[in-house]
């Protein structure tokens, strides 16, 4: 059992790194797991986050997780779903980190908020980049497999952070590096695709113009 108020700042930031990454993947699953862990006595929450262990919040998070569980596995629609959740997962992760660090100095609390939002943004962006990469695939199984993996990582990382914050934080940092590389690769592929499309458009316009000129002459 992890006593939140008795751990060091390093352990707290490691825990927040892991939880924020999980929230970037699946916010509703993360909140539901945090609430259940607190309810079962495995993760005492700071006063600012005690609302997470209330049954209404746990139930609402579970219902939203169930909705996302299916919505996130529909090709194409999952891109829209994740795009909309950019404005939910990232701010929510920052708010959770901010409230969790309420016992620290204002400067450290602000740092915790920026850490939470930043880590969640990387996780969310990496998740979106992976979806963009596999969406053209004609078969539906890769999308569902990726979504199930994300759900498992979010739940597992949150559970691990409750008892082994440093281990969970280290794992989250490894995933951050991996996701950052994936984001860079996806951006390069998109830019390359746009350039190829631009060249094809210019070639097509040139061909049409030449044909029109031949007909006119």
Image: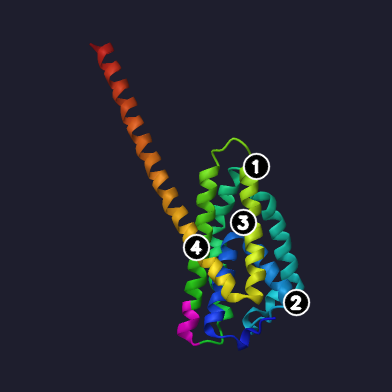
Residues under labels 2 and 1: Cα distance?
A: 35 Å
Residues under labels 4 and 1: Cα distance?
A: 25 Å
Mark 3, mark 2: which one is toward the viewer? 3
Q: Earlier in the sequence, mark 3 or mark 1?
A: 1
For the N terminus, give its image quadrant: bottom right
In depth, the one of 115 and 50 nearer the eye is 115
Residues under labels 2 and 4: Cα distance?
A: 29 Å
Q: Number of numbered discs present?
A: 4
Dot 4 falls on a residue whose secondary structure is helix
Dot 1 falls on a residue whose secondary structure is helix
Above-or-below relation of 181 to 55: above
Residue to which mark 3 is pinned: 150
Q: Are marks 2 and 4 in contact (CB under 8 Å)?
A: no
| Span of residues in magenta | 105-111
Q: Is residue 150 found left or right of 129 in the rendered image?
A: right
Q: Residues within 10 Å of mark 4 (few under 14, many from 20)?
A: many
Residue to which mark 4 is pinned: 176
Q: Please, what is the dominant secondary structure of the magenta stretch?
A: helix
In depth, the one of 164 and 135 nearer the eye is 164
- Residue 99: x and y in percent read 58, 79
- Residue 176: x and y in percent read 49, 63
Identify the residue shown where x is 53% and y is 52%. Answer: 128
Q: Are marks 2 and 1 in contact (CB under 8 Å)?
A: no
Q: Earlier in the sequence, mark 3 or mark 2?
A: 2
Dot 3 falls on a residue whose secondary structure is helix
Residue to which mark 2 is pinned: 39
Q: Are marks 4 and 1 in contact (CB under 8 Å)?
A: no
For the C terminus, give its image quadrant: top left
Residue to which mark 1 is pinned: 141
Q: Earlier in the sequence, mark 2 or mark 4?
A: 2
Q: Earlier in the sequence, mark 4 or mark 1?
A: 1
Mark 2, mark 4: which one is toward the viewer? 4
């Amino acid at each position: 059992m992890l006593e939140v108020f008795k751990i060091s700042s390093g352990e707290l930031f490691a825990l927040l790194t892991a939880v924020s990454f999980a929230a970037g993947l699946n916010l509703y699953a993360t909140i539901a797991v945090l609430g259940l862990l607190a309810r079962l006595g495995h993760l005492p929450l700071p006063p600012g986050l005690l609302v997470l262990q209330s049954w209404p919040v746990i139930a609402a998070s579970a219902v939203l997780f169930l909705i996302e569980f299916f919505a996130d596995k529909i090709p194409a629609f999952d891109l829209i779903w994740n795009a909309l959740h950019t404005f939910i997962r990232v701010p929510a992760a920052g708010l959770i980190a901010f409230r969790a660090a309420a016992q620290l100095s204002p400067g450290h609390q602000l740092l915790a908020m920026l850490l939470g939002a930043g880590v969640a943004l990387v996780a969310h962006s990496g998740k979106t980049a992976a979806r963009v990469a596999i969406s053209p695939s004609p078969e539906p199984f890769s999308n569902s497999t990726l979504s199930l993996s994300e759900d498992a990582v979010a739940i597992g990382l949150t559970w691990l952070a409750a008892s082994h914050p440093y281990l969970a934080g280290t794992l989250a940092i490894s995933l951050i590096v991996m996701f950052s590389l994936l984001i860079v690769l996806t951006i390069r592929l998109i830019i390359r695709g746009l350039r190829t499309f631009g060249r094809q458009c210019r070639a097509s316009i040139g061909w049409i113009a030449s044909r029109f000129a031949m007909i006119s002459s």
